[in-house]
Image (spheres, rainbow, N blue to C red):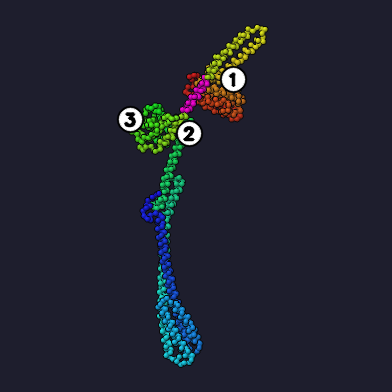
Amino acid sequence: MFSPRGASAGPFSGLTQRLVAASILLALVVGGGFAVMLLAIDELRADDRRTRRAQRVTVAATQLQRLLLDLETGERGFILTRQAQFLEPWAAARAGFARRARDLLALTAGDAETTQRARSIVDAQRAYIDQYSVPTVEAARRGDPSAGTGARATDGKRRVDALRAQFDQLLGPEQRRSAAAAASSEAASRRAAAGAIVGLSGSLVLIVLYVAYLRRAIVLPVRRAATMAGRVAAGDLGARLPEREAGEIGALELAFNVMGDSLERNRDELAALAEEQAALRRVATLVARGAPPDEVFAAVAEEAGRLTGADLTVLSRYESAAESTSIAGWSRTGRRLPIGSRSALGGHETRTLVLETGRTVRIDRYDPDDDSVPHAWRGLRSGVGAPINVEGRLWGAMTVACEREEPLPAGTEDRLAAFTDLVATAVANAESRSELMASRVRIVATADETRRRIERDLHDGAQQRLVSLALQLRAAQTTVPPELRDLDAELDGVATGLAGVLEELRETARGIHPAILSEGGLGPALRTLARRSAVLVRLDLRVERRLPEPIEVGAYYVVSEALTNAAKHAEASAVDVRIDAVEGVLRISVADDGVGGAEFGGGSGLVGLKDRVEALGGSISVTSPPRAGTAVNVKLPLGDDVSAPPGT
């Protein structure tokens, strides 16, 4: 898979081939030394065999010669002295001749020349015994005077001298052979020692060179690889091995560097992905918590610009097929952005192309001479635009651009798509919230108007009718004769009942929509509400000006519902009500000393208050720990004019 430098330079370029060649060379040197030693040892063995044979032949011939001398000595002594004691060694020598002769012949077997000489000696000695020595001794025993004559002695001496000469002829070559074998053994010993020294020295030199080569070719590269692997494991993905070895180690170095490159690319890709996910998560967090669209748009512009490496990011909303509005932007270079302004569409630029195609577009080179390109986009070299689709319609576009010569990196389109989805979600959420808030405002306004109409209808209709009936009843009562006291009493009771019904109807009408709130404003209405409360109310009202009617109505019903809950459910003895207006916000605080435990959805009327407050764009919170009272805190936005009269 990998082809490091020099990997195919020759038959022994690979590390395995080099190790095999070095091993073969080492084996040849060691084997050669041992071969020399074995040959020398074999030669020493042959020389030793020849030496031992020569020595045995020499010993056997010497022993046979000694028998000859014993024969002659015993023979001569007996002839001269006629004493039988000289015949003992003679008889022993004669008896041992045959065995010694066989030994000599056996030892000389295999060498024709030596065997011939040995056989001549044996035959001559046997002839000497049979033809001279035995007849002479027998003659001497018989007393034959001829046994001691000079002629017989001369003949015996001649025979012995001839035998000695034959022994010398046999022993001389054997001694020379022994000496030659000894010399050869010495030479072989020297050759064996030299072979051993050369083999051992060569083996040591090759082993040292072999170890040095292994250290340079394997140990040091592997150690470098282990060091680099440790650095990679510690997080240094830029660590690389120098690719200077051949064969398998070179392949290892190349593979390590390829792995390092791959890990570094993967790290960069993961870092880019993590950065992208973090940017998307930050924007998604803003969208999820319902941040204002302007804040979301600004965050998207900055995050997308930093993530893609662009110099400029602009979010545009299409107003028509010919115009768009720049609603957010970000610049790395400090370029002035036309945020909030409308500009015409047209020419070869991303917003126009996105509107025409409805897809992501890329421009790798803007034409600096194209007059149709808006002035704000002049000087840009490349750009990418992505559509923002909200609920199936093309709402706007997001453009990233750079002033550098090189175009934006690949993948910019995919990254923009993720951000445009978040922008679309934020826009859809904002539109949904706006529609929901408008719907809530319409519902609250309709409910308030319905209350006013019911209160007006009760006041102008049923209430006036009851007053008229009561007056007619009193007029009829005055015409009752005195004797009809029972009828007068009944009419009086009916009139009193009508007056009670009328009073209850008036109270009901005031609860539906107090007239004093419309006539006198929030302050008088709350003071009246506090006086009529069944629980002691400490009112701290710091707003004396008239507020917008929806705000006054909302504040009135917040306090009214809180006082009703304190009286009916909280078992409170006192309630503190504080109202003030600071920095365009009306803050309402109602706190009692009751049993606590109130919560939204508990049937306490707080859900209706929450809907009313949120419909006005405000917020409400309830703190009600058990046995520690209940505190209701409300914030209502007043807008720019906090003193506007009702109905404006």
Q: In front of the other: label 3 or label 1? A: 3
Q: Residue at x 39, y 26 (%)?
A: 320
Q: Label 2, on which residue?
A: 285
> CB of mark 3 within 8 Å of CB of mark 1?
no
Distance from disc 2 to disc 1, alpha carbons, whole Å, reads 48 Å
Counting residues from the N terminus, which is met first, the one under dot 3 or under dot 1?
A: 3
Question: Within the magenta stretch, is there residue 442?
Answer: yes
Does dot 3 land on a helix, a strand or a loop? loop
Q: Residue at x 42, y 90 (%)?
A: 151
Q: Is residue 276 visible?
A: yes
Residue 371 numbered tag: 3
Q: Residue at x 42, y 70 (%)?
A: 43
**Within-10-Å neighbours for mark 3: few <14, some 14–19, many 20+:** few
Residue 396, located in which quarter of the rendered image?
Answer: top left
* Magenta stretch, residue numbers: 431-449
Q: What x and y, as percent, mark residue 533?
A: 59, 21
| Residue 530 position (above or below residue 182) | above
| Residue 139 position (above or below residue 360) | below
Give, as a three-letter code, the residue at label 1.
Arg
> CB of mark 3 within 8 Å of CB of mark 2?
no
Give, as a three-letter code, the residue at label 3.
Asp
Residue 72, located in which quarter of the rendered image?
Answer: bottom left
Q: In front of the other: label 2 or label 1? A: 2
Does dot 2 land on a helix, a strand or a loop? helix
Q: Label 1, on which residue?
A: 532
> Which one is nearer the viewer's eye here, 47 or 260?
47
Counting residues from the N terminus, which is met first, the one under dot 2 or under dot 1?
A: 2
> Which one is nearer the viewer's eye here, 455 or 1?
1
Give, as a three-letter code, the residue at label 2.
Thr
Q: Residue at x 40, y 72 (%)?
A: 184
